[in-house]
Amino acid sequence: MKQRILLLILLLCTSTLVAEIAPHEYRNMQLGSPEHLQLKVLSVSKSYNLFSGNTKVKANAEVLLVTRSNSNLAVGDRITIKYTHNKTRKHWAGPRPIPILRKKAETDAFLAFDAEQNCYVPSARGASFEPLIREY
């Protein structure tokens, strides 16, 4: 009996940890992002982890437009972006994964500078490389 209760509690706790995020929360993350840029992706390298199914991504990009920049980026600057694309599991709910950038693509980017890695990282989770989500 105690094992069943513990299992039920565990299932309830983990199901809330992988729930989808509401669109207005993604918008709030975008609005709170230190960097809002328009980028042209120059190169992308990927490293796939066989066991987790996740992909580490490293992209180099050129800044085409600066809407907001706490790190004083300017048009023409080249930056490095690093992040992990988490593979979504079939039939599981959860936050949308950060998409894998493609070479030559032009995209909006909501980023933050990571001084420890000396690169930029996505700051709006799965909405980091989308246009600003409209308010409804």
Image (tube, helix red, strand yellow):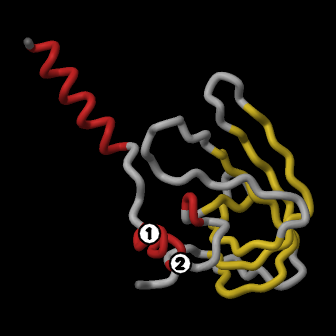
Which element carries disc 1, helix, strand or loop? Answer: helix
The residue depicted at 86 percent of the width and 65 percent of the height is 41
Please give the label number shown on residue 77: none
- The residue pinned by badge 2 equals 133
Q: In this rendering, would 136 be left or right of 39? A: left
Point out the image quarter for the N terminus. Answer: top left
Point out the image quarter for the C terminus. Answer: bottom left
The residue depicted at 69 percent of the width and 71 percent of the height is 109
The residue depicted at 87 percent of the width and 72 percent of the height is 62
Which element carries disc 2, helix, strand or loop? Answer: loop
Please give the count of numbered marks on the rendered protein.
2
Q: What amino acid is at disc 1?
A: Pro
Q: Position of residue 78 (x, y in %)?
A: 87, 70
Work out how far the residue at label 1 is from the one at label 2, CA to CA, in angstroms. Answer: 8 Å
Q: Position of residue 14 (x, y in %)?
A: 32, 35
Quadrant in the rendering for residue 38:
bottom right
Q: In this rendering, would 109 be left or right of 44? A: left
Q: Nearer the viewer, residue 73 or 135?
A: 135
Q: Position of residue 61 (x, y in %)?
A: 85, 66
The residue depicted at 87 percent of the width and 76 percent of the height is 77
Closer to the N terminus: mark 1 or mark 2? 1
> Above or below — where is 35 with respect to 85?
below
Q: What amino acid is at disc 2?
A: Ile
Please give the label number shown on residue 23: 1
> Above or below — where is 5 with respect to 80?
above
Q: Position of residue 98 (x, y in %)?
A: 62, 54
The answer to whether the residues at label 1 and label 2 have Cβ atoms under 8 Å apart is yes
